[in-house]
Amino acid sequence: MTDCATAGVHGVVVIASGFAEASAAGREAEQRLRALVRASGMRLVGPNCMGLLNTDPAIALNATFTTPVLPPAGTIGMLSQSGALGLAMLDYVQTLHVGLSTFVSVGNRADVSSNDVLAYWADDPRTSVLVLYLESFGNPRRFARLAPDVARRKPIIAVKSGRSAAGSRAAASHSAALATSDTAVEALFEQAGVIRANTLQELFDVAVLLSTQPMPLGPRVGVVTNAGGPGILLADTGETHGLVLPELTPETQAALRTVLPPQAGVANPVDMIAAATPAQYARTIELVGADATIDALVVIYIPPLVTDPAEIAQAIAHGVGTVPAQKPVLTVFMTAQGIPAALNMGPRGTLPTYMFPENAALALSAAVRYGRWRTRPRGTPVRLSSFAHSAVRAVIDRVLANASGPLWLPPGDLATVLGAAGITLAAAEQTTPAEAVATAERLGYPLVAKIVSPDILHKSDVGGVILGLDTPAAVASAVETLVARTQQIGARLDGILLQRQVSSGLEALVGVTTDPLFGPLLVCGLGGTLVEVLHDVAFRLTPVSDSDAAEMLTKLRATVLLDSYRGAPPGDREALIALLLRVSALVESVPELQEFDLNPVKVLAPGAGVMALDGRMRLAPPG
Amino acid sequence: MTDCATAGVHGVVVIASGFAEASAAGREAEQRLRALVRASGMRLVGPNCMGLLNTDPAIALNATFTTPVLPPAGTIGMLSQSGALGLAMLDYVQTLHVGLSTFVSVGNRADVSSNDVLAYWADDPRTSVLVLYLESFGNPRRFARLAPDVARRKPIIAVKSGRSAAGSRAAASHSAALATSDTAVEALFEQAGVIRANTLQELFDVAVLLSTQPMPLGPRVGVVTNAGGPGILLADTGETHGLVLPELTPETQAALRTVLPPQAGVANPVDMIAAATPAQYARTIELVGADATIDALVVIYIPPLVTDPAEIAQAIAHGVGTVPAQKPVLTVFMTAQGIPAALNMGPRGTLPTYMFPENAALALSAAVRYGRWRTRPRGTPVRLSSFAHSAVRAVIDRVLANASGPLWLPPGDLATVLGAAGITLAAAEQTTPAEAVATAERLGYPLVAKIVSPDILHKSDVGGVILGLDTPAAVASAVETLVARTQQIGARLDGILLQRQVSSGLEALVGVTTDPLFGPLLVCGLGGTLVEVLHDVAFRLTPVSDSDAAEMLTKLRATVLLDSYRGAPPGDREALIALLLRVSALVESVPELQEFDLNPVKVLAPGAGVMALDGRMRLAPPG
């Protein structure tokens, strides 16, 4: 390596293993490698990797030790954190009739990281689709900043493994990588527009689609088939994942009727029946492709004995040439005999081909979701005004000045901080029976009165909660009743809690949790504490933009509750979005924030806003 | 056909189309066909089908018009409701090195139905795995009765398509089949032990596993691999679907250390690293296979340049021969170059082989779920005693005697019916302010008092609900307050509702809905009405057995609430199961039942039972 540096070498690939993945001595050796390249200005890929290759004819570099010949040139850039798996991926992708621009096995990432490769591809004109196999993130926050910028320009499709206990145990043991919370990864990928493939198969299915076809402009798909069954399977899987199969226009249906036999189905899927001829395929593809109600086309073929697959393939390729260029076309060729070469020799070149209709549906739906993400406005996060920021910092700095460890922000300080950030907490105060009426007059009506007693866990079980107090007299009478009940059951009474009553409104929870690698995650759920049991919560990395916040709400199954659900009043969606943005802004002003909950938050009628009934914030002094 | 009957032919396959799927005249022609075979004693497969085949050497029947030669003989019976798709399936399965006993394209099912074929296979010694592609059920209730009996003996793996709107539109148009509710299908398959494959790929992946390997006795899987990445992917997908990757015993790990290089991971997955030799494969498989903590084994291979796939395949086949016979073994061969023949020539014969680790994980987890279903007790449904049955019928018959259409059972009659069925409804009565105390004395304490007014929609918003009344004096005072509040807001007062208070307990809903094809479905959810929004409800066809009822509860995400969740008191699971069984029994006694809800049901502490707070039942006169 020293010789390389002396000779003026710019880049080095270290394939050898036995470094950080192996032992403490290896880790030290790896640090020396890194120090050497950093001092010399060289860049280093590896160690413990399978190498890299670049198919650019001007470069034609094969620096792998496993792949004897360069794969065909193409537009896919592929990165693998697992060397052996990268090899299998390289092997497999060549069966799909698509080519690669570059392949990088990043290994231990002593110098060049996955993020560096991502940044390189973002500007590489030969690369248009980015395929990643990741087991961990070296610098997750840099990935979080970089990925959305790259994904706006080029699709990133990733398998991120190590979700499971055994999987992360294996990932940790074989590459010394830190296991990250999959919740944060999921949030990051959704927010950053990274297409997460659940399986390797899906990774390739999507990559082939996006490297050969335009991005779909919408979810509406037309299906042309010579067998009913696969059309139905495509519709089932597609609709489950957000595709729509609209009925074709009457004009298209009428035109199809003149081409196809009477037994054919022409609504969509278009079932041409088994004996469909090459001419019928070509013309039907042309008619369905031209229909303005569809954004993408899937052509399915099952070879019956009566037709010649090669002729049909040629007809499909020819027909696809007439489909408007902005509409992607996918094919399903259900045969174990291999795909006729003619399929990829039409005006559109290589067509994505799938063995089963479900794969085509999954790939297309992933592309549709990505296309939607790319066209949605990025939005902007909210920041606290400098006045609000100072007010918040004054409290936080004072509280943390003498803190020796993490602490819960005292209620009064919490109210001040939230008030400065524009977050409304329902007025509440603990008082004594004697002072209750005076406290009530200060808080305003209506009020709820609750027993405060160390002996009573479930207040409402003992009649310890009285609602609907709207006069001083009602408060006095309620307090009398509560005192009597406490005595009756022999419990101690610490005081009476009076709280402004917000009996209408939908319950939500808004909070912040901290991922050890990714940092603060904003969390939101709707409909009471049960949503936590049912895992119906959405996460986003902070800071969130208004688009992110709006999308969080649509990700919840309970999002229907914000509209007028079963006659219940709707909720103030805009105000809830604004609250999410304010909480995100607060996180930016308070990096010491470790945990924060507003629960419950009442979402009132549209225009009436939201109100947090309870809140707590945990801080950790910087150190 | 007449000639066939005259000649004494036993069975006929009608391939011709143009029958019920095509037109009204065709439907009539099909009815004539059916009448003819029914009169003659012949059986008919079709019309509008691809035919059938039987590989039994004593029969060697190829009555398809599409497949020139018989496929290899084996133990898979395959049925397809889509002719063309059946053909593609027949084509594909032959690439998997497994054979068929029989293949039937059932077509329009004018005589022989899918159920008939299922019944045939149940007793056919040459068939051990049943593979179905279904778009509809001709006689869903017969399938519901037949399938569990068959599935106890032989696995049934099915793709049931037509879930989506467009899918069922296509299914309806191309085979005139009725679209069925997928909820009922899902309930039926789970209850009947039918393995539902979500994709064709999964259908084959599971079929190959079950036709070549024993049923796994548990979910614990050992993984042997020469690359880390695929092991992690297998662990991720497997754990998501119920598999477990336990750490191997210290003895196994120590033995592996003597065989493998120091960089190898030996916990599980066992990562032998890329250069693993044939001898290492064979010995590692033997050691992991012998480990008592695992029930099944997955062997993964990615061919690096340094090893010869054929030699490794032979070593794997040989090593698998040493694995105890009751443990299934799956292989993942990540190469596009094809599987070496040696892999299937060891003592175990054909091994299931997958291109990607996720497919192996999905197939094995489906087999584990099926194995668990098969070993669980069938259980028995509850029936009403003849005394209870008479009591219920007396009410129902009286109410329906004069009914001209569907009706809601009046509250008093509902209470009688539920009482007879052993279902407890919380005592409640609408009364007047003057009679409230007398009513309270009759109902017992504690009580809730509620305003009944046509002008008040949300009672608690106006303080119209008072809880915790446990003396006559408390009732009198509460009634006075309610009357005053009603006057205060100028609302009319119809009366006061007094109801026994059940303030503790977890909320559940139990009900019955009727599927047009499958009949009554029992439904259960936990945690309040929100569960409906979040679709956290479980369905089963009635009658349900005690095993079914217990399983319904475990299917709910909210099932954790029945245990002591976050310090909240646990619920009486047994009593909730008993309630489900009683509701199921009630359905058997009241076939006129169309819709039935107990909502909310309070699930009290273990031993304290359950109590329905509200209920309603809709009946339709038979007609």
Image: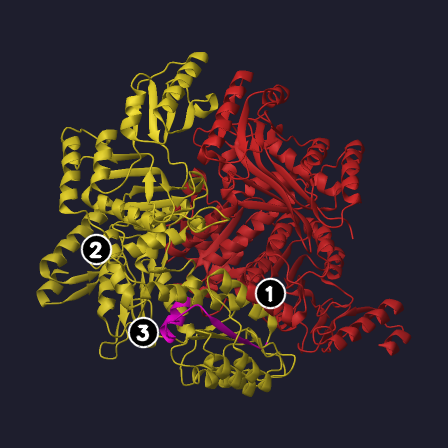
Chain colours: A red, B yellow
Is residue A373 in the magenta section?
A: no
Q: Please, which chain is the residue tagged with disc 1 on? A: A
Q: Distance of mark 2 from mark 3, alpha carbons?
A: 27 Å
Q: Distance of mark 1 from mark 2, alpha carbons?
A: 54 Å
The mark found on residue A168 in the picture is: 1
Q: Which residues are magenta?
A: B206-226
Is residue B207 in the magenta section?
A: yes
Q: Distance of mark 3 from mark 1, alpha carbons?
A: 39 Å
Q: Which residue in the structure is indicated by mark 2?
A: B110
**Mark 2 Cα shell of 10 Å, populated few (<14), some (14-19), many (≥20):** many
Q: Is residue B376 left or right of residue B46?
A: right
Tell me what residue is drawn at x 46 percent, y 32 percent.
A565
Please identify the quadrant where the N terminus of chain B is shown: bottom left
| Residue A317 drawn at (x, y percent) | 53, 58
Query: Secondary structure beneath disc 3?
Result: strand
Q: Is residue B590 left or right of residue A381?
A: left
Q: Amino acid at mark 1?
A: Ser
A31 versus A623 height, above or below: below
Q: Are marks 1 and 2 on the same chain?
A: no
B257 versus B509 height, above or below: below
Tell me what residue is drawn at x 13 percent, y 64 percent.
B4
The mark found on residue B75 in the picture is: 3
Q: Amino acid at mark 2?
A: Ala
Q: Amino acid at mark 3?
A: Thr
B599 versus A148 height, above or below: above
Query: Secondary structure beneath disc 2?
Result: loop
**Mark 1 Cα shell of 10 Å, populated few (<14), some (14-19), many (≥20):** many
